[in-house]
Amino acid sequence: MNAGLLATFFGTGGRWSGPCTLIIDADASVEAVGSDAIIQGGQKSYSPRLITGRVVADSVRLLPEQAALVAVRKHVIRQSSGDDRVDFTVLVVNMDHVVGIEFRDLRTLAALGIQPPDLEK
């Protein structure tokens, strides 16, 4: 993806942006489609895994000098005791392997100077 376009979205001043989904040209993400289970006799049943190049990130930061994006995702895992365990995944991606970025709202269009569509009709 064009470095100037990435700088438009994420800035070059070392700030965190997000959330978004990075689409990269590699099988970089493995997601469970359902939940794993232990069935009769202690045998494990694993849900199918989806391998994709879509990486969901809570925050992204551009490192222009290194030609990389740093993506951070927060995972909250509910324990059987009722407590939550918080884990983080950090992914460093070469900018040349980013083929797209998906944002959850229309505010990003303003950074491109594009008027959002009128979808209220």
Image: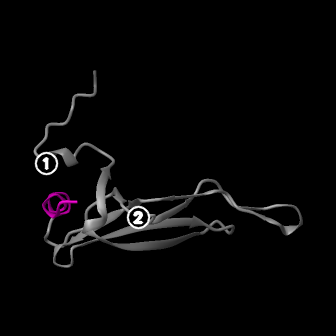
Q: How is the image coloured?
A: one colour
For disc 1, the marked residue is 112
Vertical relation: 111 (above or below) 66: above
| Residue 55 falls inside the magenta stretch | no
From the viewer's side, name the closer residue of 25 and 64.
25
Q: Quadrant of residue 83?
A: bottom right
Q: Residue furthest right?
A: 41
The residue under label 2 is 26
Which residue is at 50% across, 71% downward? 86
**Residue 105 figure quarter:** top left
* Residue positioned 64% across, 68% down in the render: 79
Q: Is residue 30 left or right of residue 95?
A: right
The quarter in which the N terminus is drawn is bottom left
Q: Residue 70 location, x and y as percent? A: 31, 72
User: Can you give x and y, in whole percent of width and height, for residue 116 in the image?
Assistant: 19, 36
As drawn, is 8 to the left or to the right of 57? left
The C terminus appears in which quarter of the rendering?
top left
Point 25% across, 67% down: residue: 96
Element marked by disc 1:
loop
Q: Secondary structure at mark 2?
A: loop
Query: What amino acid is at disc 1?
Result: Leu
Residue 66, by quadrant, is bottom left
Q: Find the magenta span and give its range.
A: 1-10
Above or below 117: residue 79: below
- Determine whether, in the image, residue 77 is placed left or right of residue 39: left
Residue at image coords 38%, 72%:
91
* Mark found first going from the N terminus, 1 or 2: 2
* Residue 55 percent location from the top left of the image: 41, 61
